């Protein structure tokens, strides 16, 4: 079995979708069709985290999508691909999971809220000041 994606040491973030694709072939290079292929995300210690399977097509090709869990810790993980036929050699690749990128949204949102409140307070102060002044005569 040959893996096309993901490439070794490719980096992902929790919540990303990993496209696992490749070909199931004989030693001669001839495609092996209609064989069940299972892709599994594992810890380096071998514990299974998530898996998904499919059948190889007429060219021996397969495609499986694995979504990384949202709370997955940063680190090195394995994507293993095995076929239901024990005569087909498994494939494995290491991937990297990085911490999710920090979003400037919470800080920006806090700034906008403070600015909005300050503007409202200033406008109210101006309006109150106008009411306290002397009456306007026509």
Image (spheres, rainbow, N blue to C red):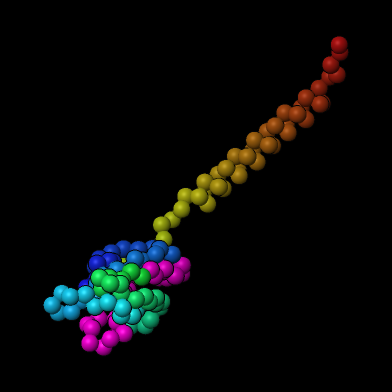
Residue lying at the far left of the rendered structure: 28
Residue in the picture at 46% in, 67% down:
70
Task: Please state the horizontal and vertical placement of residue 110, each as a whole percent of the image.
Answer: 56, 48
Region in magenta = 65-92
Visible residue check, residue 119: yes
Residue in the picture at 13% in, 77% down:
28
The picture quadrant where one finds residue 6 is: bottom left
Q: Is residue 77 magenta?
A: yes
The picture quadrant where one finds residue 21 is: bottom left
Number of numbered labels in the structure image: 0
Residue lying at the far bottom of the rendered structure: 86
Please state which of residues 79 and 108 is positioned toward the viewer in this rendering.
79
Visible residue check, residue 9: no
Residue 128, placed above or below residue 6 = above
Residue in the picture at 30% in, 72% down:
57
Please state which of residues 89 and 129 is positioned toward the viewer in this rendering.
89
* Side of 93 relative to 67 (left or right): left
Residue in the picture at 35% in, 63% down:
12
Residue 45, placed above or below residue 96 = below
Task: Please state the horizontal and vertical placement of residue 38, each as a whole percent of the image.
Answer: 34, 78
Where, quadrant-wise, is the N terminus in this rendering?
Answer: bottom left
Please state which of residues 124 and 37 is positioned toward the viewer in this rendering.
37
Please state which of residues 134 and 89 is positioned toward the viewer in this rendering.
89
Task: Please state the horizontal and vertical placement of residue 11, each as a whole percent of the image.
Answer: 31, 63
Residue lying at the far top of the rendered structure: 138
Task: Please state the horizontal and vertical placement of residue 54, each as a whole percent of the image.
Answer: 36, 75
Where, quadrant-wise, is the C terminus in this rendering?
Answer: top right
């Amino acid at each position: 079995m040959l893996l096309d994606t993901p490439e070794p040491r490719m980096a992902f973030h929790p919540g990303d979708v990993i496209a696992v694709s490749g070909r199931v072939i004989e030693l001669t290079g001839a495609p092996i069709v209609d064989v069940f292929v299972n892709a599994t995300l594992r810890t380096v210690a071998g514990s299974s985290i998530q898996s998904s399977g499919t059948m190889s097509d007429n060219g021996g090709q397969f495609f499986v999508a694995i979504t990384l869990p949202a709370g997955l810790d940063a680190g090195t993980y394995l994507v293993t691909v095995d076929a239901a036929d024990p005569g087909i050699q498994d494939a494995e690749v290491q991937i990297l999971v990085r911490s999710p990128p920090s979003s400037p949204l919470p800080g920006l949102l806090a700034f906008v809220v403070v600015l909005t409140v300050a503007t409202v307070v200033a406008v109210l102060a101006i309006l109150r000041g106008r009411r306290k002044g002397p009456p306007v005569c026509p």
